[in-house]
Amino acid sequence: MAEPSQPQTVETKAAAAPVQSSPPAASTKDSPDKPTRRGFFKWLTGGWVAFTTGVGMMKILTVRFLYPNVLFVPPSSFKAGYPAEYQIGQVDQRFKEKFGVWIVRNEEGFYALSTTCTHLGCQPNWLEAEQKFKCPCHGSGFYVTGINFEGPAPRPLERYRIMLADDGQILVDKSKKYQFELGQWKDAEALLRV
Amino acid sequence: MWQKIKTHISESQVWKSVIRHGYPDTRRNRTLVVLSNFFLHLHPTKVPSHSLKLSYTWCMGGLTFFLFLVETLTGVLLMFYYRPVGEYAYNDILALREHVPLGIMREIHRWGAHAMVITVWLHMLRVFLTGSYKPPREFNWGIGVVLLTLTLLLSFTGYLLPWDQLAIWAITVGSNMARATPFVGHEGPGAKLLNPGMLGLEDVPLIHATDDARFVLLGGPFVGEATLLRFYVLHCVFIPLAAATLMAVHFWRVRKDGGISTPTDDFSQKAL
């Protein structure tokens, strides 16, 4: 490919020689269509801005891709049946697997306990005979109230917002939590009085 | 007759297209063996004999690489049977023991993984004890630290794949650490600073349990099926590729930094 174009190159070189000897400003004045150094850098800057913007957008989209639009997980609030279904002193395990919540009824009312151990996040078991929650991972123990009393857990289990829905069923809202050590168990919706 | 066959083969076009040097009985040919081989060219062409002493190197780097190859081979074989779906994963692991000949393939993979973590630590210890992290090898020490992290991450992601209670809760506990990632973990230092409220705008925290570093690792708010798939892909594709790339750089740097460090480094430098 280089060989046939060789005579051409010689010609252009010969033609370019006198232009080189004249000042460059004159040459641009002579032919306004000819690419200038400034024009080239303008184009280059624009090109780089467009390129980096494009790459940046793609990076954002790539990170965003890791966060799905839809999550197939149970909703954060659910109805847990009518208060009459529960007996005093009973720890209800029906919603443990799906929602991660124990519903407990005592003389005062109902509370919804989180099933997440406050040590490292495992799921304790309710031991009916010993009347305690016992975590299989590292042995943390909690009273039926959720107060920690043995093992490495640093604080009591958390409680969730609990109230009565319009149809008279118990409604548990996991988006709001109440921590004992912050004095939040005294809040109105940490305990459902019936 | 024998000589004739030998010449016939070694003078053939096929032979010459593969091997470009004579029998390695001269210094030049021995050098060419290493230089003209893609896999060996990462290595130095000459190695001081005393740097091959087991009492000096413990062969821990080599053993780690060997175990990586074992893990790659056995891992690819396991991939023929294992399905990273909640419905199948646990049973596929059990089936790997009974439903295939040589039911110890998974055990080899598991033991190899434990051994690799041990050898990589011992390799690091040896490099430290012999002062091989010192100039000009500081950069290679840095690469080594990243490789150590990748080895531990391979171990961590592989631990979830049996999909039993031990795996699920171990990963739950382990991934809870990501909550405390600075800025991008929702319980980490600085996470509260990423809030338009800091600029006098509406007070909305940007980092929650549903958009932080832990979420992106697990593919959800807790260890679920999305986590299993994510860890599978990380374990089988992403981390091995990253580790293999860095290993190539690691070995190449050993050569470029003057080969395996030796006690005579100082002497040779003084002599120069």
Image (cartoon, rainbow, N blue to C red):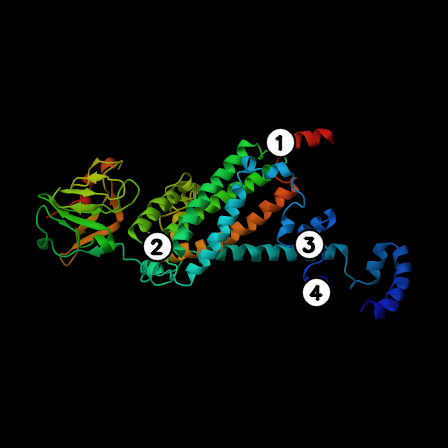
Q: Amino acid at mark 4?
A: Ile
Extreme residue toward the bottom, this view: A4
| Cα distance in 3D space between marks 1 and 4 | 47 Å
Q: Are marks 3 and 1 in contact (CB under 8 Å)?
A: no
Q: Which residue position is annotated with label 4?
A: B5
Note whether A11 is above or below B210 in the view shown.
below
| Cα distance in 3D space between marks 3 and 4 | 25 Å
Q: Which residue position is annotated with label 3?
A: B36
- Helix, strand or loop at label 1? It is loop
Pick whichever of labels 3 and 4 is earlier in the sequence. 4
Q: Are marks 1 and 4 in contact (CB under 8 Å)?
A: no
Give the image location of residue B207, x and y in percent: 39, 47
| Cα distance in 3D space between marks 2 and 4 | 55 Å
Q: Amino acid at mark 2?
A: Pro
> Which tag is nearer the camera, tag 2 or tag 4?
4
Q: Which residue position is annotated with label 1?
A: B263
- Helix, strand or loop at label 4? It is helix
Pick whichever of labels 3 and 1 is earlier in the sequence. 3
| Cα distance in 3D space between marks 2 and 3 | 43 Å
Q: Amino acid at mark 1?
A: Pro
Pick whichever of labels 2 and 3 is earlier in the sequence. 3
Q: Is residue B271 rendered to the left or right of residue B119?
A: right
Q: Are marks 3 and 4 in contact (CB under 8 Å)?
A: no
For mark 2, does the 10 Å Cα neighbourhood hold few (<14), some (14 to 19), or many (20 or more) residues? many
| Cα distance in 3D space between marks 3 and 1 | 30 Å
Disc 1 chain ID: B
Residue displayed at 49% across by 50% down: B68
